[in-house]
């Protein structure tokens, strides 16, 4: 087992923009990743198994609902703290960060924002501690980039509702205790519904044969005449804007998380280039390798500045959905490009599990697609700056 020698790049002294608390939170997450994730993650990815043993550790570093108030079990942290935790977790693995992102932004966030006091007290503390794990059901087999076309529906049946439909590509679904499911009522209005493990007709088959996010559990949510109490409907907001607001929070976390993956690839390539001797000297001394490394650190630095500013805006309540889209798209794009360039620098060694680069590269192929594809985010920016809708 190779030791985790990761050293985070900070070319523009961006730590100066962080508070002492930010740095303490980030360093705690970084130390946990080095101790508990790095030693096991390659084997987990090779075996395509989510390492459930890390769930208590994720909870201990505040990865589950970091910004949720302490009265509901959260850490009560700010948005930059949330971003930094996601950055460090994704430095370890995108799949592990996906698990934390779903729990925080797609399950705890809507319950906190749109749930009743009873729902908050019932679910949030257990989700924050990792006793409960959650999933988020929006994407369907035929409705990905167009979630408003969903066909999952429920009908009124007195003191309860009957839910039918299916959701696909759902992180955490195989082991989730509760799913926040978005479905249409009989008037085609979208609502959030809390579906609990054990409800008759609710199943969560796992998706196998993935080449990406192999250390993350992905599956389906299937509803066949599931009887759900009306008290499990989130009453605070309905319509498509409700799940999209959750995606804003998740995309914000991804914008930070992707930087972590990019940092790990850069750090690995930099260290390797200083050790690998060809033609009588380290390959770090060759112009083309220096070009790759210089471009990597430049793009990482730009992404760090973009994420930090977005964090400030989001903490102030000023960040727009379009601004979040820009950061998600840009930061994932630079990360996947850095992973590809770093893989080339390592030559044949870059495809082995001895190094993290190929795993990051495969993972980022999913990250660039989920929570809004690369192209969809471009169109969101296009709509924002032109006022012209290119979606239809």
Image (cartoon, rainbow, N blue to C red):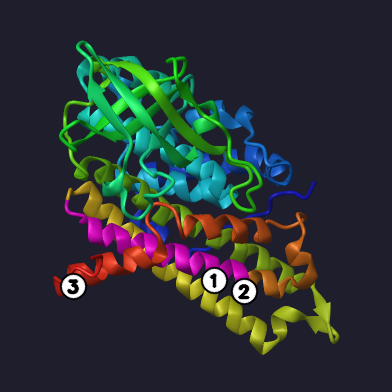
Say which residue label 3 marks: 385
Does dot 1 land on a helix, a strand or a loop? Answer: helix
Residue 335 in the magenta stretch? The answer is yes
Question: x, y percentage for residue 75?
Answer: 36, 30
From the top left corner, tell me how far across and down residue 387 is, in percent.
14, 70
What's the residue at 33%, 14% (across, down)? 122
Seen in the picture, residue 211 relative to 48 is either above or below; the reply is: below
Q: Is residue 110 above or below residue 159?
A: below
Give the number of callouts. Answer: 3
Apparent side of residue 297 relative to residue 276 in the rendered image (left or right): left
- Estimate the spatial distance between the alpha carbons at disc 3 and disc 2, rounded to whole Å: 32 Å
Write the start and end of the magenta stretch as one range: 318-340
| Callouts 1 and 2 close, C-beta under 8 Å | yes
Query: Majority secondary structure of the magenta segment?
Result: helix
Residue in the picture at 65% in, 86% down: 288
**Which of the 4 image quarters holds residue 307?**
bottom left
Q: Are marks 3 and 2 in contact (CB under 8 Å)?
A: no
Secondary structure beneath dot 2 equals helix
Mark 1 or mark 3: name the one nearer the start of the chain.
Answer: 1
Asked if the residue at tag 3 contacts the one at tag 1, i.e. Cβ–Cβ closer than 8 Å, the answer is no
Label 3, secondary structure: give it.
helix
Is 299 a magenta residue? no
Q: Which residue is mark 2?
A: 341
Q: Which residue is mark 1?
A: 337
Graded by Cα atoms within 10 Å as few (under 14), some (14 to 19) or many (20 or more), the crowding at tag 2 reads many
Is residue 288 visible in the rendered image? The answer is: yes
Dividing the picture into quadrants, the one containing residue 272 is bottom right
Q: Residue at the spot x=25%, y=61% of the render?
A: 323
Task: Tell me the residue at 36%/32% (across/down).
Answer: 107
Percent x, y for residue 105?
35, 39
> Is residue 313 depicted above or below 339 in this figure?
above
């Amino acid at each position: 087992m190779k030791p985790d020698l990761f050293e985070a790049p900070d070319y523009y002294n961006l730590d100066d923009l962080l508070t002492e608390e930010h740095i303490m939170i980030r360093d705690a997450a970084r130390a946990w990743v080095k101790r508990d994730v790095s030693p096991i993650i390659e084997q987990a990815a090779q075996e395509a198994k989510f390492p459930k043993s890390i769930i208590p550790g994720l909870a201990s570093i505040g990865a589950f609902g970091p910004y949720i108030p302490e009265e509901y079990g959260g850490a009560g942290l700010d948005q930059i703290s949330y971003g930094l935790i996601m950055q460090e977790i994704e430095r370890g693995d995108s799949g592990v960060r996906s698990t934390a992102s779903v729990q925080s932004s797609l399950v705890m966030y809507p319950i906190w924002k749109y749930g009743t006091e009873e729902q908050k007290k019932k679910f949030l503390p257990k989700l924050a501690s990792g006793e409960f794990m959650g999933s988020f059901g929006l994407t369907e087999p035929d409705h990905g980039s167009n979630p408003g076309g969903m066909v999952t529906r429920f009908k009124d049946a007195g003191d309860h509702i009957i839910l039918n439909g299916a959701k696909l590509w759902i992180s955490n679904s195989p082991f989730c205790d509760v799913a926040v499911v978005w479905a249409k009522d009989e008037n085609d209005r979208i609502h959030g519904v809390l579906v609990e493990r054990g409800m008759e007709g609710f199943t969560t088959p796992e998706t196998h044969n993935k080449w990406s996010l192999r250390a993350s559990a992905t599956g389906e949510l299937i509803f066949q005449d599931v009887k759900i109490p009306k008290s499990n409907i989130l009453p605070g907001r309905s319509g498509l804007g409700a799940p999209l607001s959750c995606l804003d929070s998740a995309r914000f976390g991804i914008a930070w998380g992707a930087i972590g993956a990019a940092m790990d690839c850069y750090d690995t390539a930099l260290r390797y280039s200083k050790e690998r001797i060809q033609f009588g000297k380290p390959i770090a001394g060759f112009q083309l390798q220096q070009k790759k490394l210089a471009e990597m650190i430049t793009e990482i630095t730009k992404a760090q500045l973009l994420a930090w500013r977005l964090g400030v805006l989001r903490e102030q309540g000023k960040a727009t959905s379009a601004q979040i889209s820009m950061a998600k798209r840009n930061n994932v794009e630079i990360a996947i490009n850095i992973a590809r360039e770093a893989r080339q620098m390592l030559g044949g060694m870059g495809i082995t599990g001895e190094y993290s680069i190929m795993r990051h590269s495969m993972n980022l192929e999913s990250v660039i697609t989920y929570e809004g594809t690369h192209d969809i985010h471009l169109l969101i920016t296009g709509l924002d700056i032109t006022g012209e809708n290119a979606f239809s």
